[in-house]
Image (cartoon, rainbow, N blue to C red):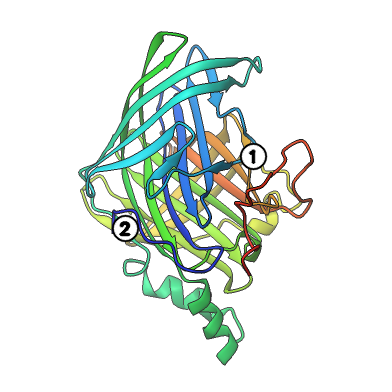
Amino acid sequence: MEQVQPLGPHPLALDSVWVQGASAEGAWLVAGVARRPRRQLDAVCLVGVPGLGTLKLPRHPDTLLVASNDVFGGEGLLIRLVEPMVCWKINYAGPMRLDETGELVDVVLDLTFTSTLPCFDFDTDMAPRTVARAMAREPWSREFFARLRDAHQTHYEQIGTTRGRVTVRGREYALSVTGMRDHSFAARRDWRLLHRYALHTIVTEDDVRAQVGVVSQPYSFSRIELGYVHTPEGTLEALEWCDLELGYHGEQGDDPWDYGFSFGAASRTYHVLVEVRERQELFCGREWEARLLERPCRYQVNGVTGWGMSEWYYRHEAGRPAAYPCEEPALGQGHEQ
């Protein structure tokens, strides 16, 4: 499962690896590579370095890059497996833009993600009642169950720590962040099927580590709650419920920076306050179908201080602007159909 997966024949086939995390001191990282057919790559690399600022790929907010063959990488960015479910490397060498000034600077990333925690496989580990509740909201038909099969993707996640060096103009900065690594692969992933989602990776001072989210994908589920909790006692528990209602939080496109919600797992209730510290906007897809907001956060969970990342998705319908051309050879979605 950890290997690079063969891409299927559909032009929206997907094989994606994503690593993110944050620290109590304010450092943060988002690095992701989504392999697509015809050497298309949806690639993200954002690094927040205390005392320096936020570094991002020169092409951002666009994420379309040319992929290297049969690896999670391209154009200087590479995420590679070292030991399954234990260790991954994240490397980059090239220019990045310093967000605060707009200046391009030479950057080298030499980072290692490691984990001793079990992964959470969304094919097998979700709470049955949570899935049943999502299914019960929808009108059942033969077509509904066909859409569920059509939209399925294999997706698993693992909480761990990414450590290493960020070298900017020859000066080294140490980076250590805790967060989530995931791997997704599917016969197709079509961003246009999604309406919205809000995901939160949470790490607290008393060693709660959680991934909590709500997804609205009307093609399959109008609302489904997703996530899990690593408890201080060492158990991994599936999310049972979450009361975050997307329609009450930023439905018109302006994501909230100060809000709260509650969720439950293993008969425990967690009350969460969220304070967003920064927001970086990205667009994925040949026609910029997806608008992603990457947001390092401060949390309070049952009164205990925490930190982490939050990713919010909005369906984007304005198309790709002329300032970010997608030139031939065609790398994008839909042209083989």
The one of 259 and 225 positioned closer to us in this rendering: 225
> In the picture provided, is 144 more to the left or to the right than 77?
right
When asked about the image quadrant of residue 167, the answer is top left
Q: Which mark is residue 62?
A: 1
User: Please, is residue 184 above or below residue 205 in the view?
Assistant: below
Point out the residue furthest to the bottom here.
142
The one of 146 and 262 positioned closer to us in this rendering: 146
**Label 2 belongs to which residue?**
120
Whole-percent x and y of residue 134?
Answer: 52, 74
Label whose residue precedes the other's in the sequence (1 or 2):
1
Whole-percent x and y of residue 320?
Answer: 74, 47
Q: Quadrant of the N terminus?
A: bottom left
What's the distance in space between the residues labelled 1 and 2, CA to CA? 30 Å
- Give the number of callouts: 2
> In the picture provided, is 236 more to the left or to the right than 39?
left
Dot 2: element = strand
Dot 1: element = loop
User: Please, is residue 307 above or below residue 216 in the view?
Assistant: above
Contact check, label 1 and label 2, Cβ < 8 Å: no
Q: Which mark is residue 12?
A: none
Does residue 72 show up?
yes
Whole-percent x and y of residue 27?
Answer: 44, 24
When asked about the image quadrant of residue 86, the answer is top left
When asked about the image quadrant of residue 125, the answer is bottom left
Amino acid type of the residue that numbered disc 1 sits on in the rendered structure: Asp
Residue under the image location 51 percent in, 13 percent down: 52
Amino acid type of the residue that numbered disc 2 sits on in the rendered structure: Phe
Mark 2: give few (<14), some (14-19) or many (20+) Cα within 10 Å: many
> In the picture provided, is 288 more to the left or to the right than 6?
right
The one of 26 and 185 positioned closer to us in this rendering: 185
